[in-house]
Image (tube, rainbow, N blue to C red):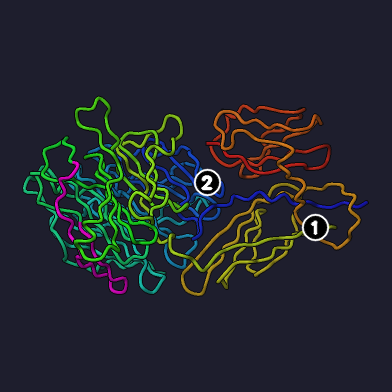
Amino acid sequence: MKKLLTILLLLTKFSADGQNTNNFWYFGNNAGVFFDSLGVHTMTGNVNAAEGTSSISDGCGILLYTDGDTVWNQNHQMMINGFDIGGKCVSFQRSSSTQAALIVRQPASDSIFYIFTTDCIEDGLVDGLRYSIVNMNRNNGLGEVTLKNQPLFAPSEEKLTAAKHDNGCDIWILAHEYGTNNFHSYLLSNTGLNVTPVISSSGQSHNSPNPTYFNARGYLKASPNGQKLINVNPDGVYSWADTTLPELFNFNKLNGIVTSDLVFPQDTSFWWSVYSAWAIPFYGATFSPDNSKLYLSSGFYGPHLFQYNLNAGSDSDIIASKTFLSSPYPWSSPQWPDLPCSMVNAPDGKIYISHLDRSYLSVINDPDSLGTACNYVNSALNLASGTVTSWGGLPNFFEDYINPKFLKADFSYSQSATGNTIFFSNSSIASNNYTWYFGDGTSSTLQSPFHVYPDTGFYNVSLIAKDSLCDVDRICQTIYVSTVTDNNDTNDGTVTVDNETNDSSHFSISPNPFHDYVSFSLKDNAQKTIIIYDYLSRQILQQTFINSITIDTRHFTEGIYFYQLRNSNRTVAYGKVIKY
């Protein structure tokens, strides 16, 4: 008989390829969703935004999020200096720009993030397009806004998107000037932001003869491959604004030039009359993941949701390919209709759609499919209790994550049978520079290091992998080191995870994710001890029970927790549970 050290691997594993940058969404009135290997889950956050927000994450979880006014860190606390950034929309008292913010990582950096913001029409667009910089190495990894409210140009519309440069590294930030037909393209590279834009004068001018109103709302979105842009201005169909119809553009990723491709004609079909307008207004827009379909929505102006096939052929063929996806109620209906607003490509390959003041999201399950085969489902995902979409804004993302990524951080491990030595095996793809953080205050830059841990317990291990150009990826695994007795007589000097210690056929958890209570049930009558740890590896609960236990978690904060079920001195089950 010999003593073995058993590592319990508790992975926060995400479902999407492409570095997990868009797995956490915060929007509306404290609403949120996140994506992992189990699917999509609801949660809550600190935003109280009428419209646009932005967030960014990696393989270790949420890094920061913003409503264009305040920046929050991974603990849902205001980041140091993270207040009164450019999209604050003073006259409306909360964020109310269509695309109030956009967060992107500086190429080649694992710690520097840019937050771009747009002002709202309620402020007269006076703050225009601005940027702030976050350094995630500050404040023990919680980040700090080190530079903020740097002006780029004004007046900028409530529009903000991004596309990858033709070199595959740099990032174009695109915005539209109000009162003109000018696009401004700014290049973000590994040396920082070039504040001198490429200006393209193309397409319709956005203006209003009535100075009280601004024809500046609606989405500007880049296709996932960065070759197309769509610009919609809902106010352009009303008498107070210059005529502005949905317009498709070509984007040159090499030089940042925008050129008009197709102006969609006025559309009076299925008109639902709330305001006096001569055509259907469009507010939301997005492309399918394979770039072949275009989706347009009317937002809080009407219940319209259309799909267009961009591969249909000629301009007239594209226009004729329109498929009506949502079913509007007549204005005389006693039920206020669903008004589809923002649309976002999600890490699970679907498009999620918010509606004006609703407690759910709709979904397009197969957005690459033609017509009704895209499988649009209204009210498909109920949000967390007490949260709503407000005016229907969703996070604004740099959607390059949809494109395949070559670089990927990954590792496995084994452990010495005679001590607390962990051997890490680096299985990252397309990388040549590595930084390990072992969770006990130490680090390494070796490709596949070993590390001696000072004691048993949970350790959060992270690996940052870089290539020689501009790409970065990070992954985290939480391991638990414990000493157990095993009768196995093998003596090969290392051990790996004991798969039998987590056989779910012998126990169940319900619900997971949980809110107020979580129950653990065993399928035998043996006495067990449950231990729960928070994400910092601090033990917060230990209790012995027989058969089943229900834990009151109302005092838990939202986030990921790790559990360990023990029988005497042997671990029989382990894993993670999520509080929302």
Q: What secondary structure is found at the residue carrying circle 1?
A: strand
Q: Bounds of the magenta span? A: 247-270
Tally the numbered discs. 2
Farthest residue, direction top:
334
Q: Nearer the viewer, mark 2 or mark 1?
A: 2
Q: Residues within 10 Å of mark 2 (few under 14, many from 20)?
A: few
Tell me the distance, in whole angstroms, between the alpha carbons under discs 2 and 1. Answer: 31 Å
Whole-percent x, y for residue 556 in the image: 58, 33
Residue 30: x %, y % from top left: 41, 36
| Residue 155 sits in quarter | bottom left
Residue 302 lies in quadrant: top left
What residue sits right under mark 1 in the picture? 495
Residue type at tag 2: Gly
Identity of the residue drawn at 62% across and 33% down: 510
- Left or right: where does residue 365 sit relative to residue 87? right
Residue 39: which disc?
Answer: 2
Residue 505 appearing in the image: yes
374 or 160: which is nearer to us?
Answer: 374
- Mark 1 is on which residue type? Val
Q: Position of residue 274 (x, y in %)?
A: 17, 35
**In this rendering, is residue 519 above or below 374?**
above
